[in-house]
């Protein structure tokens, strides 16, 4: 019985240790993400609202403005919305 309790305590301790490490990494990643947003190195996708790195974004031009998207799907959705709004106006 004592060996079982010792084993259970060791497993619990290891689990808590790894869980704490994962939470710390998650917080550090979130802080880095916020810093990149503040620096302007990450921008918000106008379709889905996720943040995307300027280096890895899918781009489209809307007049003088360059828009950044997280994926081709989001870019295509945006272009379809623009197309349908132009068709409904004209």
Image (spheres, grey):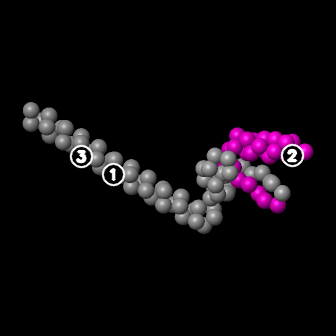
* Residue 33 vertical placement versus 19 (above, below): below
Q: Which residue is mark 1?
A: 20
Quarter the N terminus occupies: top left
Please say if the residues under marks 1 and 3 sit with CB atoms less than 8 Å apart. Answer: no
Secondary structure category for the residue under label 1: helix
Q: Residue at x 39, y 55 (%)?
A: 24
Q: What residue does disc 3 label? A: 13
Highlighted range, magenta: 64-90
Q: Is residue 77 magenta?
A: yes
Of the image marks 2 and 3, the number of the one nearer the N terminus? 3
Neighbours of disc 1 within 10 Å: few (<14), some (14-19), many (20+)? few
On the rendered structure, is 1 left or right of 57? left
The answer for how far apart the CA atoms under marks 2 and 1 are is: 55 Å
Is the residue marked by circle 2 packed among few (<14), some (14-19), or many (20+) residues within 10 Å?
few
- How crowded pointer 3 is (Cα within 10 Å; few <14, some 14-19, many 20+) is rated as few
Which residue lies at the image location 24% right of the left edge and 46% below the top edge? 13
* Foreground tag (2 vs 1): 2
Per the picture, the main secondary structure of the magenta-coloured stretch is helix
- Residue that numbered label 2 is attached to: 89
CA–CA distance between discs 1 and 3?
11 Å
Mark 1 or mark 3: name the one nearer the start of the chain: 3
């Amino acid at each position: 019985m004592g060996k079982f309790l010792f084993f259970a305590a060791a497993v619990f301790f290891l689990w808590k240790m790894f869980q704490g490490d994962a939470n710390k990494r998650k917080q550090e990643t979130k802080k880095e993400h916020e810093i990149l947003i503040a620096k302007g190195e990450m921008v918000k996708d106008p379709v889905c609202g996720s943040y995307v790195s300027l280096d890895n974004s899918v781009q489209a031009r809307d007049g003088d403005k360059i828009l950044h998207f997280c994926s081709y799907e989001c870019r295509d959705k945006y272009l379809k919305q623009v197309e349908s709004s132009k068709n409904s106006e004209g």
